[in-house]
Amino acid sequence: MTTQPARPERIGHETASAMDVAPFAPSLVKAVFRDVTPMHVSRSAAWAAASVTRTVLTEIIAGARRSAAGEARKKLIPTDLLSAISRNVEVEVAGTWYGHSPTFKGETGVRSRARKPSAVVGAHRFEAGIKRLLRSQGATAVPVMLRDLDGIASVFLTDLARDAAMVVREGGIRRFGTVTLGTSGDPAAPPPAFENPFPDLSVRSGDRRTIGRDDVLAATTMQLFGDIRQRALTEAREATRLTVACSP
C-alpha cells in the first residue's frame, strides 16, 4: 500500500456535526494520562486532549466513509480504514497499533513505529465514544473496525500524553532546529534563519508538576502535521474556551 499526501475532503456538514459530539470524557482522558505520568492533569488539558483525539478520529472516519461510499456501503470495514490512511498521510498516527492489529499485517505502506505496547491494553475503553462519533457522521462499523478505531484512539492519546509530559519536564518544545545543505569544498554558509511556527508553545511557564492545556497543544504539534494539525489546534482551543466559559 502506497501512502500519498492528500488534502482532506469535507463531506457536507460532517465536520460541524462531529464538533458537536464530545465522545471522550475528561475522566477517561485523565485515566490515560495516569498510565503515562504521575503529573497532575488540568481540566483544560484533559478537554484539549479529548478534542485533538476527536479531530483525528473524525478525519479517519470521514476518509473511511468515502471509501465505503464508493461501494454504496454505510457500515465501515477494515478495508475502509486502510484506504483512509493510505489516501491521507496526515492521519497516519498511533503506529504501535499497526503492529498489534491484524488489519495492518503486510501493509508495508503504513509505518510501524517502535513504541511501548502498553497503550493497547486499554483500547476497549473508547468504544462508546467511537460509536457516538460514527453516529454523528451517519455511519456504523463492523466489530473489527470498531476495535481498530478503539486502538488508534488509545495509542494516539497515550503518545499525546507522553509528549505533553515531556514538554512539562523540558520546559517547552525542544524539537526545532536547522539543517544546512552544501557541497564538499564550498565555504560554510551561515544556517538560514529558522522561524518557529508555534512560538507561543515553544517555551512554557508554570510549575513542573502539572500538565496544562498549552502543554497538550505543544504535544499536538509534535504528533500531527499539515492541515489536520492546524485544525486540531484550532478546535482544541475553541473546545477549551467554551469549557472554561461554561464552568461554574
Image (cartoon, rainbow, N blue to C red):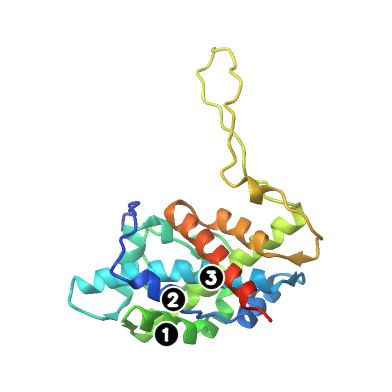
For marks 3 and 2 on the same chain, the one whose residue lies earlier in the sequence: 3
Query: What numbered label is drawn on residue 54?
Result: none
Query: What numbered label is drawn on residue 131?
Result: 1
Query: What numbered label is drawn on residue 51?
Result: 3
Q: CA distance from mark 3 to mark 2?
A: 16 Å
Q: Nearer the viewer, residue 69 or 103?
A: 69
Q: Position of residue 101 (x, y in %)?
A: 44, 74
Mark 2 and mark 3 in contact (Cβ < 8 Å)?
no
Q: Position of residue 65 (x, y in %)?
A: 29, 73
Q: CA distance from mark 3 to mark 1?
A: 16 Å
Task: Write the residue at 48% across / 72% down.
Answer: 54
Q: Amino acid at mark 1?
A: Lys
Q: Amino acid at mark 2?
A: Leu
Q: Position of residue 195 (x, y in %)?
A: 58, 36
Task: Write the residue at 46% across / 79% down.
Answer: 21
Q: Is residue 11 above or below residue 3?
A: below
Q: Which residue is mark 2?
A: 149
The image quadrant of residue 214 is: bottom right
Q: Quadrant of the N terminus?
A: bottom left
Q: Residues within 10 Å of mark 3 (few under 14, many from 20)?
A: many
Q: Position of residue 207 (x, y in %)?
A: 82, 60
Q: Residues within 10 Å of mark 1 (few under 14, many from 20)?
A: some
- SS at mark 3? helix
Task: Write the residue at 43% across / 54% down.
Answer: 227
Q: Residues within 10 Å of mark 2 (few under 14, many from 20)?
A: many
Q: Nearer the viewer, mark 2 or mark 1?
A: 1
Q: Does the image show residue 117?
A: no
In the shown orientation, is residue 41 left or right of residue 20? right
Task: Write the residue at 28% across / 68% down.
Answer: 11
Q: Nearer the viewer, mark 3 or mark 1?
A: 3
In the shown orientation, is residue 229 left or right of residue 6? right
Q: CA distance from mark 2 to mark 1?
A: 10 Å
